[in-house]
Image (cartoon, rainbow, N blue to C red):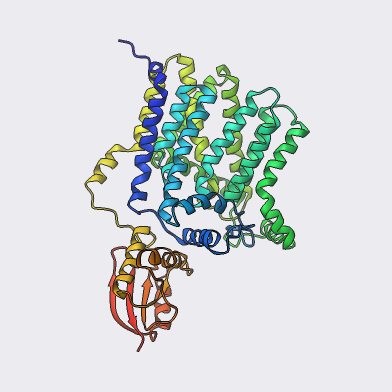
Amino acid sequence: MKIHFSAFLKKQSLFLILVILVGLYLRLPGVFGNYFAFTYDVGRDMLALWNIAFGTHKLLLIGFTTGLPGVFYGPWWYYMLLPFYILSLGNPQGIAVTMVLVGVAAIICGFFLGKKIGGNFLGISLASLIAVSPVFVGLSSQIWNPYISPLFLVLTLLILHKIYSEEKSRKRYFFVLGFLIALIIDLEIVFGFLLAIGLILSLLLVKNKKLQWKSLISFIIGALIIFSPRIIFELRHHFLMTTAFMKFLISGDSSKRLSLVETFINRINMIFNQFNSTLALDNKFLGVIIILFIAIAIVVLYKKTSKINKQFIKTSLIVLLTFISGLTFFRHDIWPYYLVGLPVFYLLLVCLSINLIAERAKNYIIPGIIIIVLFLINLNPISIVSNLNKPAWVGDASVYKNQLQVVDYVYGQAKGRAFKEQVYTPPVYDYTYQYLFKWYGPNKYHYAPSSSSHLAFFILEPDLQYPFRLTDWLKIREKDGKIIKSEKFKSGIVVQTRINQ
């Protein structure tokens, strides 16, 4: 009996729900078990949100510093988190759940993007791969501002579809486009800057028409709404960030300089490795096969596909070439989060290529099998089953559950007595424990540490990269009370109980 895959697509809602459930299954266990990372950056953000919600009640004009000296992110990360922070009563677990919801929203928006471009099959394909891709799962399992960029990139592509689809695009679409691109820049400056260049080039080359002044003005107004807090800050502080950014661009890299060819090869290798992590479980051979498949499908079938398919294939390739070119001439160190949203284009290209085959064959059997195979490869059910029989994962000193265990231990040893705490952590600033002793301790045990007490707890995180720093830190403080007890946890964290005589 002949089976048409298209018949199943009439149940698109059921397929989408199943895909979302799989996505939730992959993302939620770490959040419910408190196994997500609670790092320096997260602690800093929680303290900032605490100050806005319960302290000064003042909204900020800038956020925290970027990786570029003297240049700060905008405040929109805090603005977006604030409602969820208040609803969760300051619980970092609530923010971790929010990140999962952002990941689920990316799955749903991916479905609508695919459906708009090429129909139900493309929508289900794109949503399915976003749901199980290890990179997307990882992004929605950690609390960090660049990691929500893919959702806003998918929304940006939905707006771009509106602009491509209409002969005379409405100004409001350009307004939203400017708003979203600026927001992505605000979440990760290097990625957002190169993305903006790529998408603007796409509009000029793919649309193949001059942009109207009214559309351009709408775009700029949308972007200015996002940039306005930092513009106000710049005006108040004599263009501090602009000056610092210009100095950074013209300064040399302190690291060993590579030739242009070596830099180009290095950037290609970075993007290739990210592609493999997104779709091929880091298997380079499989990654090459998928790339060859994309290339052959586009070369052979491109001319006979629809105009909108062509436009998004061109857009994806233009953006990728923009990143390769931009990062090649950007001679400074490249961090993985500079590429944070590129997996959206990898998945879009592979799904568009599979959809080209479906259009050509006029049935979905072979394309459906390809999607199912990729889905299962990235879901990796063998690994899931084998992990069920393994002992519970402990993790290291950065895991939220382990830090809660330490705080509970400290209060348990204090037994209601006043105490002070000192923390050694490799990032130097102990924002994580500052927050836990500000929020978690007082909420559960109804009192906070004291600045003056004979009882003290020294919380020592392992410094695996520079162990001598912990040794030196302890040597300076060897006379700060008598050690009466030392407890080492499975996470590697050590807590010393000290008494000042």
Judged from this view, the residue extending furthest toward the left is 389
Considering every residue shown, the one lying at the far front of the view is 446
**Residue 299, above or below 480:** above
The part of the image, by quadrant, that contains residue 286 is: top left
Q: Quadrant of the C terminus?
A: bottom left
Q: Residue furthest bottom?
A: 501
Q: Tell whether 395 sits left or right of 297.
A: left
- Quarter containing the N terminus: top left
Q: Is residue 497 above or below residue 316?
A: below
User: Which residue occupies the foreground of this view, 101 or 270?
Assistant: 101
Residue 50 in view in this figure: yes
Q: Is residue 464 visible?
A: no
> Residue at image x 63%, y 24%?
165
How many marks overall? Answer: 0
Compared to 464, does 272 lie above or below? Answer: above
**Residue 461: image x %, image y %?**
38, 68
Which residue is located at x 38 percent, y 26 percent?
14
Q: Position of residue 27 (x, y in %)?
A: 38, 44
Of 393 and 457, the residue lying toward us: 457
Residue at (63% x, 46% y) in the render: 193
- Closer to the camera in the image, 468 or 92: 92
313 over 190 or under it: above or below: above
Where is residue 476? Give x, y as percent. Answer: 43, 83
